[in-house]
Image (cartoon, helix red, strand yellow):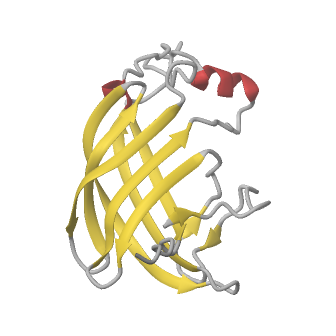
Amino acid sequence: MTPTPEDGDDDGEADRHLGGGDRDHHHREGVTAEVTVHAHERPVERVGIAREILLHAQAGADRDQHLRSADFFDVARYPQITFRSTRIAPAGNDTFLITGQLTMRGVTKEITLPVTYAGDVRDPWGNTKAGFSTETTLDRKDFGMVWNAALDQGGVLLGDQVKISINLEAKLEQPAPQPAP
């Protein structure tokens, strides 16, 4: 399955996964993903995601540029964030624990994501699509993001914990027909 960034659909508005309850905020430019599924065995067999670091901060271009700098994502040296699953285990009804290697800023850490499978549906154009969602919290310092600034009234500007939310809709692609022997 592959993610489905529909043309002209990157408007920052939220919608639902084809009638389901999962929210999708359309921040998916530069995402490539492969989700391998076996419908009769379990919804997810393997996951691989690569995300180009394209930032669109609400605070403007200066903040975007700072986030791209070596203080944070160091996009010039590390233009992608990647995740490759190594293990998938059922964790309840339509929920899985997906363990894998997350690489950001050249640092690779094993993480486990609690993933909810939102089901699959056929869209009005005949495509089969499946929805998945997860949330986790990472310590930015684990990935070399240590920049901070002291505040005049005490304390620092940034916390160390960063909440990550992922909503993925994937379209089923049929395997290419095998040539006759």
Residue 121: percent from left, percent from top: 53, 85
Instruction: Look at the picture and state if 27 lies above or below 116.
Output: above
Number of residue marks? 0
Q: As drawn, which residue projects farthest toward the right?
A: 8
Q: Is residue 66 left or right of residue 119?
A: right
Q: Nearer the viewer, residue 65 or 75?
A: 75
Q: Quadrant of the C terminus?
A: bottom left
Q: Nearer the viewer, residue 85 or 12?
A: 85
Q: As drawn, which residue projects farthest toward the front?
A: 181
Residue 46: percent from left, percent from top: 32, 60
Q: Is residue 20 left or right of residue 142?
A: right
Q: What residue is at 62 percent from the left and 59 percent from the top?
A: 25
Q: Is residue 39 left or right of residue 21?
A: left
Residue 40: percent from left, percent from top: 30, 85
Q: Nearer the viewer, residue 155 or 41?
A: 41
Q: Quadrant of residue 63?
A: top right
Instruction: Look at the picture and state if 146 lies above or below 96.
Output: above
Q: What residue is at 58 percent from the left and 18 percent from the top?
A: 69
Instruction: Look at the picture and state if 163 lies above or below 71.
Output: below
Q: What residue is at 51 percent from the left and 25 percent from the top?
A: 73
Q: What residue is at 51 percent from the left and 16 percent from the top?
A: 71
Residue 87: percent from left, percent from top: 21, 56
Q: Is residue 32 left or right of residue 37?
A: right
Instruction: Look at the picture and state if 68 lies above or below 25.
Output: above
